[in-house]
Every structure is written in C-alpha cells, then in structure tokens.
Image: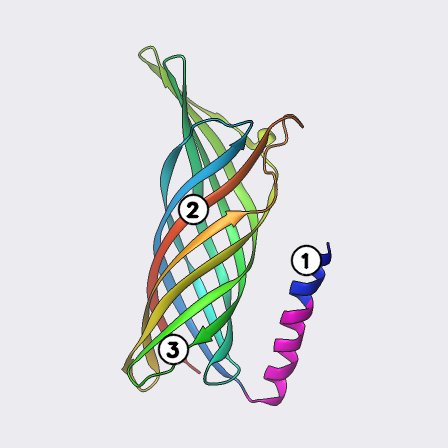
Amino acid sequence: MKQMSKIAAIFFILSSISVFSQPSIELGLEGGLNLANVSITPSQTSNSRTGLIVGGVIDIGISNSIGVTGGLRYIMKGFQVTNQGYTFTDKLNYLEVPVLLKVKFPLTEIKPYVIGGPVLGIRVSASEEQSGGGQSADVDASSAYESIDFGLLFGAGMDFKVAPKTDLFLQGGYAFGLSNIWKQTTTVTVKNYGIQITGGVKFKL
C-alpha cells in the first residue's frame, strides 16, 4: 500500500504541474502484439501465448522532456501448459488502463523516449482450450481467475514526426503482474507477464 501511495502522489504532482504549464495533448491509436506468459508458484513450466493489442492512447506533454502517457486498450494474455499428454491453453483477455511516466529525448524529426508506471487490467473473458487423446474442448474459466489484474510496464520507443500535427510511433515494453490472478487455491500463485511490441499514430490537438 505504501508503494501505491507513492505512485499516486507522483502522478498527482505531475497532473498538478500540467495544469499550470499548458501541456500539449496528443490523441491516437495503437496496435501490436503481446508475447504473453505467466509465472507460476510452485514452479511449473508454461509456454507463451501470442495475442493482439489494440486501443487508444493519450500523450500529455508537461515539458519538452517530461510527460504522461496512457489510454485504454484491449489486450490478449494467457499461457499454455502440458500435463500427461494433454495440452491446456488458457486465454485471458483484458481491458487495460496504463498510466505511465514518459521521459523524452527531443530531437527534431525523431524523438526517443522511455516509459514506466502502473497498469490496471479488467478481465473481460477467460477460457481454457483442452486438447489431447484426439479430442478438444473449450470451457469457460472465469471462475478460476480474478477479475482485476494490477502490474507495471516499462519500455522505450520512438516518435516520428510525419506532419506538423501528426506523429507515428514504435514502442517495445515488458509488463509484469504484481497481483495473483489465480483464485482456485491459496497454495498456487499465478502472475501475468509479457513482452509487448506496438505502433500507431498520434494527432496533436
């Protein structure tokens, strides 16, 4: 809770500063891939699931080098495990709200940056595909997973100026969950993580 309070305080300060510094605002769209997996305790080997990321972004520039970036996006997560000849693929899909500090290195046409901060995920669906022995089935897995996922995202990217009020961007990041999303038993912990590659376009208001 102390860490959460510190994060909230930092973003409150940044928001307060932006009110008085006439921030620049950009709105845009992003899309890409999430190479998703989970960490399981007690240790169990799992394979990744590749999913899509699509959504909207907002960039608030507080100064030439500091800003806040966030948005709302749909992201596919999950993992795959094999046990006694059977394969279980868990498909977890979320609506995510990232709120990230953005440190920019402003050049002229190309602007590199780094990002980091908290991400809140709201699960919209959970299913498990079971296959083996010549048979397969898809079952609802909503009761096995928490509806809220909280984590952190760190990454870097580049903005490319293509017109006076239009930027393209390319971004890579690593996200890892802080909360246990498994609720079937208290003896097992499951946390999301993934490598994310996205790109898109932003328009200055």
Left or right, 106 with respect to 123, comes to: left
Q: Amino acid at mark 1?
A: Gln
The residue tagged 3 is 203
Q: Residue at x 51, y 51 (%)?
A: 95
Where is residue 153? Give x, y as percent: 49, 56
Which label lies toward us, 3 or 2? Answer: 2
Task: Give the extent of the magenta segment.
Answer: 9-22
Which label lies toward us, 1 or 3? Answer: 1
The residue tagged 1 is 3
Q: Is residue 116 covered in magenta?
A: no
CA gap, disc 3 and disc 2: 28 Å
Which comes before the other along the chain, label 3 or label 2?
Answer: 2
Rendered view: 83 above or below 23:
above
Q: Amino acid at mark 3?
A: Phe
Q: Residue at x 31, y 12 (%)?
A: 134
**Mark 1 touches mark 2? (CB < 8 Å):** no
Looking at this view, is 22 or 157 the one in front?
Answer: 157
Q: Residues within 10 Å of mark 2 (few under 14, many from 20)?
A: many
CA gap, disc 1 and disc 3: 34 Å
**Mark 3 touches mark 2? (CB < 8 Å):** no
Q: Magenta residues: mostly which secondary structure?
A: helix
Where is residue 35? Give x, y as percent: 37, 45
Left or right, 105 with respect to 12, comes to: left
Looking at this view, is 28 or 109 the one in front?
Answer: 109
Residue that protrudes farthest toward the bottom in the picture: 21
